[in-house]
C-alpha cells in the first residue's frame, strides 16, 4: 500500500469549546466549525489536520492515512479484498466531512480505526497562528505521528506491516519499572522522511491513543508552547526531554480528549535506503520524566 503520511486524526469530545480553546490558546492553531457541530483544527495550508467530533466519550477515534492517488486507493482496496479483511467505504457525507475523494475505513486487530483516503480537498489558505507560531513541520510528512495501543501486539504489527505496508524504523522494549516485564513499542514509517508516522505500544489505553505528535521549527516555539501549557493550567504528562531514537526535543501534555500531545522540534528525517533498524534501551537521552503525568 502506498501510504504517504498521517494526513489527519479524528478525536471525540463532549465539550467542543474546550478543544477550541486548547487548539487556539495552547497549541496555537486555527479552528473552524464543521457542519455537524464539530471542529476543524488547521495547522498548515490545508483546511484541517485534526477533526474533533461531538460525542459522549472523550477519546481518539481514527487516524487518516493519505494515499498518493486514485490508483493507490484502488490498489489499497484490492489488497483488503485479497486478504479478506473487513472494511467499509465512506459514504458521501463522510467523504465531505473528511475533505477527501474516497475513504476506506478499516480496523486493525487491536481495534484502532484507520481511514485510508486519497485526493484531499484544499483551499490552500495560509496558516496564521493566533499565538504567532510561524509554522508547523508538515507538508508531505503529514501532521506528525500517532502512537496507538496494541495489547495483541503480534497480530496488530503483522497487519500494519503486511497489509497497510508500514516498515519498522526501530524498536524498544519498555520496562515501566526495573522489575516489570518489558512491553514492546515499535516505531514505523511510511513513504516520507519522518522517523515515524506511527508507533504501537503493547498495552491498552482507554482514550484510544498513547499520544499524537506535532512538530515546530525550533526550540523557541517549543518553549513558547510550554509557557502556554503552564499559563492555561493544562496537565503536563512528561517534562521536556530528547528522545533517543528520533532525537526530538519535546514535552507532553494532555489533550481535551484524554490522550497526550507531544509538542516538539528537531525530529529526525531519514533516507530509508541508508537507515538500519535497531533496538534502543532507553526512551530519552535526557529529560522526559513521565512520572509528572501520574501525579
Ligand atoms: Fe512521540
Image (tube, rainbow, N blue to C red):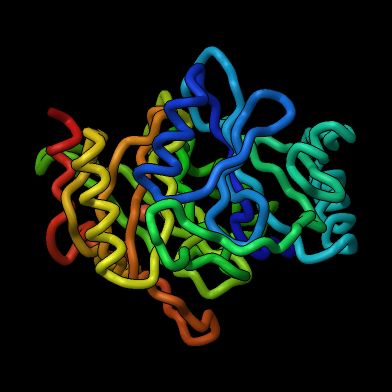
Quadrant hosting ligand 1:
bottom left
Q: Where, by quadrant of the figure, is residue 115 drawn?
A: top right
- Residue 154 lies, in percent from the top left, at 50, 44
- Residue 204 lies, in percent from the top left, at 40, 29
Instruction: Please name whichever residue, 1 or 240, is drawn nearer the observer in this view of the structure.
Output: 240
At horizontal 54% and vertical 12% (from top left) the residue drawn is: 56
At horizontal 25% and vertical 36% (from top left) the residue drawn is: 232
In the rendered image, the quadrant that contains the C terminus is top left
At horizontal 31% and vertical 42% (from top left) the residue drawn is: 183
In the rendered image of this protein, does residue 111 appear above or below residue 140?
A: above
In-image side of 15 versus 79 (left or right): left
In-image side of 107 versus 97 (left or right): left
- Residue 14 lies, in percent from the top left, at 50, 17
In the rendered image, the quadrant that contains the N terminus is bottom right
Instruction: Tell me if residue 158 can be seen.
Output: no
In-image side of 95 versus 15 (left or right): right
Q: Where, by quadrant of the figure, is residue 36 drawn?
A: top right
Amino acid at each position: 500500500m502506498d501510504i504517504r503520511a498521517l494526513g489527519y486524526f479524528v478525536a471525540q469530545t463532549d465539550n467542543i469549546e474546550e478543544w477550541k480553546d486548547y487548539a487556539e490558546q495552547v497549541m496555537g492553531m486555527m479552528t473552524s466549525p464543521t457542519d455537524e457541530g464539530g471542529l476543524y483544527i488547521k495547522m498548515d495550508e490545508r483546511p484541517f489536520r485534526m477533526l474533533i467530533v461531538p460525542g459522549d466519550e472523550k477519546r481518539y477515534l481514527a487516524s487518516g492515512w493519505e494515499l498518493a492517488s486514485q490508483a493507490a486507493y484502488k490498489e489499497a482496496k484490492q489488497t483488503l479484498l485479497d486478504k479478506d479483511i473487513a472494511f467499509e467505504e465512506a459514504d458521501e457525507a463522510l467523504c465531505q466531512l473528511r475533505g477527501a475523494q474516497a475513504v476506506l475505513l478499516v480496523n486493525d486487530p487491536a481495534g484502532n480505526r484507520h481511514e485510508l483516503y486519497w485526493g484531499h480537498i484544499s483551499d490552500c489558505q495560509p496558516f496564521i497562528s493566533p499565538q504567532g507560531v510561524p509554522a508547523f513541520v508538515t507538508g508531505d510528512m503529514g501532521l506528525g505521528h500517532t502512537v496507538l495501543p496494541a495489547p495483541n501486539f503480534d497480530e496488530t504489527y503483522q497487519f500494519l506491516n503486511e497489509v497497510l505496508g508500514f516498515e519498522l524504523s526501530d524498536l524498544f522494549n519498555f520496562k515501566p519499572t526495573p522489575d516489570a516485564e518489558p512491553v514492546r513499542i515499535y516505531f514505523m514509517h511510511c513513504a516520507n522522511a519522518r522517523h515515524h508516522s506511527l508507533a504501537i505500544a503493547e498495552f491498552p489505553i482507554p482514550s484510544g491513543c498513547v499520544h499524537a505528535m506535532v512538530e515546530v521549527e525550533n526550540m523557541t516555539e517549543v518553549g513558547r508552547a510550554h509557557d502556554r501549557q503552564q499559563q492555561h493550567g493544562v496537565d503536563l504528562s512528561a517534562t521536556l526531554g530528547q528522545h533517543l531514537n528520533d532525537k526530538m526535543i519535546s514535552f507532553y501534555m494532555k489533550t481535551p480528549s484524554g490522550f497526550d500531545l507531544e509538542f516538539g522540534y528537531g525530529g529526525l528525517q531519514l533516507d530509508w535506503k541508508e537507515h538500519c533498524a535497531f533496538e534502543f534501551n532507553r526512551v530519552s537521552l535526557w529529560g522526559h520524566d513521565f512520572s509528572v503525568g501520574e501525579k
